[in-house]
């Protein structure tokens, strides 16, 4: 790597030569490759704390904030709890500031939860509960931090030799020193598809969703499939429809239940082939919704109101979820179609 080490020898020259984004990406890449450099970064970096995978948060009004805690504060607290400072090396690198101050995530699950909560004045909150009230920058950061911490927690041994595998300092891989096998953190690719027949869109719910919430169709990729094949198969499996055309929208890391990469598509079915046939093993309900109904659901937010006919009105996933973005895009696209 041509830039290897230049950052450390001539930081000011290096910073003048590169945009902030390029500088940050190269800095992070170097930290992943070099344990000594990463150790230095740990000694001047800031930390997001977790306890058994629940992030440490402070509630401000209706919002949750994830405070960054300095290494000095963590060392002081560890001293008070009589815990070895070496635990800091279990942290994982999750990003850096524009000034190249590294961010790490550290799980303090071995310490007493309430003691850390009163030390740092906040609480460890289940990510699923807090996710949608998090600040715009914190949500993706905590989502990837939790996924990385979970992966390290569940991948402690080599699946070939059964020997313990060792994390590099940044946490970007684990290595079996008996046979040199390198393990990289995994995530499962999954597609999410908003199906339309040209004037309506199809939303569905699983029994496990909160009452009243409907979303786009989602499903994991099978080995060997292209993303387009997954979209077609999932739509056929879950609602018995054949996709005529599809186009890519965007992607998102999704931490629940395990780490997934959600790849989002819009799809069209033929207007004369819209009869839904639900796979009851996967879905509780699925229906076509008009533009007016979807616009009203977006406006209402996360509330399911009882209507005059006794049925409950539906709502859609909150704005951080890529399903929400697909639905917003569909609405915009419908509203721009001349009538
Ligand atoms: N970000 C968003 O807006 C949304 C995200 N999602 C996420 O999409 C993902 C996929 O949706 P589902 O309908 O549950 O998938 P799915 O339709 O493929 O069904 C889940 C089943 O697939 C099997 N499966 C195959 N490969 C798997 C893997 N790598 N990991 C786990 N299970 C696997 C399991 O039997 C599991 O019960 C879920 O993680 C869900 O949380 C779902 C809706 C909205
Ligand atoms: Mg599904």
Image: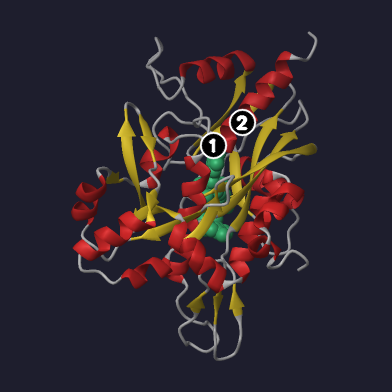
Tell me which colouring the rendered structure shows.
secondary structure
Q: Residue at x 50, y 66 (%)?
A: 40
Under circle 2, the secondary element is: helix
Q: Nearer the viewer, residue 99 or 118?
A: 99
Is the residue 338 above or below the residue 331 in the image? above
Q: Residue at x 72, y 45 (%)?
A: 19
Q: Position of residue 162 (x, y in %)?
A: 48, 87
The reply to whether callout 2 and callout 1 are in contact (CB within 8 Å) is yes
Q: Is residue 282 visible?
A: no
Q: Nearer the viewer, residue 13 or 24?
A: 13
Q: Residue at x 60, y 40 (%)?
A: 217
Q: Report which residue position mark 1 lands on.
A: 321
Is the residue 174 above or below the residue 148 in the image? below
Numbered badge on residue 325:
2
Q: Nearer the viewer, residue 89 or 185?
A: 89
Q: Position of residue 130 (x, y in %)?
A: 38, 39
Is the residue 195 above or below the residue 230 in the image? above
The quadrant where residue 65 appears: top left
Q: For the C terminus, which image quadrant?
A: top right
Numbered badge on residue 109:
none
Q: Position of residue 337 (x, y in %)?
A: 78, 15
Mark 1 C-beta to ligand 1 under 8 Å? yes
Mark 2 surroundings within 10 Å by alpha-carbon count, few (fewer than 14), some (14 through 19), many (20 or more): some
Q: For the N terminus, which image quadrant?
A: bottom right
Q: Nearer the viewer, residue 57 or 100?
A: 100
Q: Is residue 147 visible?
A: yes
Image-based side of 329 in relation to 137, left or right: right
Label 2 – label 1 distance at C-alpha:
7 Å
């Amino acid at each position: 790597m041509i830039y290897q080490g230049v950052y450390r020898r001539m930081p000011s020259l290096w910073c003048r030569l590169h945009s902030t984004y390029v500088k940050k990406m190269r800095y992070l890449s170097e930290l992943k490759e070099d344990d000594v450099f990463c150790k230095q970064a740990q000694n001047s970096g800031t930390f997001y704390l977790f306890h058994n995978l629940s992030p440490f948060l402070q509630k401000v009004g209706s919002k949750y904030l994830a405070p960054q805690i300095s290494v000095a504060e963590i060392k002081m607290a560890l001293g008070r709890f009589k815990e070895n400072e070496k635990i800091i090396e279990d942290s994982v690198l999750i990003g850096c500031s524009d000034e190249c101050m590294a961010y790490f995530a550290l799980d303090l699950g071995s310490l007493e939860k309430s003691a850390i909560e009163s030390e740092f004045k906040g609480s460890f909150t289940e990510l699923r509960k807090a996710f949608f009230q998090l600040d715009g920058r914190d949500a993706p950061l905590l989502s990837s931090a939790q996924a990385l911490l979970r992966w390290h927690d569940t991948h402690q041994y080599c699946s070939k030799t059964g020997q313990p595998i060792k994390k590099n300092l940044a946490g970007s891989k684990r290595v079996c020193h008996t046979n040199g096998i390198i393990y990289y953190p995994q995530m499962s690719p999954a597609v999410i598809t908003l199906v339309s027949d040209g004037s309506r869109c199809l939303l569905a719910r699983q029994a496990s969703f909160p009452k009243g919430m409907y979303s786009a169709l989602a499903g994991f990729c099978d080995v060997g499939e292209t993303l387009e094949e997954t979209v077609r198969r999932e739509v056929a499996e879950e609602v018995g429809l054949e996709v005529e055309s599809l186009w890519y929208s965007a992607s998102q890391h999704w931490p629940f239940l395990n780490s997934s990469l959600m790849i989002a598509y819009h799809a069209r079915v033929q207007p004369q082939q819209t009869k839904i046939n639900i796979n009851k093993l996967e879905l509780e309900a699925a229906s076509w919704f008009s533009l007016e109904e979807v616009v009203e659901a977006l406006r209402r937010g996360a509330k399911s109101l009882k209507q005059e006919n006794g049925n409950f009105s539906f709502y859609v996933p909150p704005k951080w979820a890529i399903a929400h973005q697909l639905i917003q895009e569909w609405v915009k696209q419908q509203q721009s179609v001349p009538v």
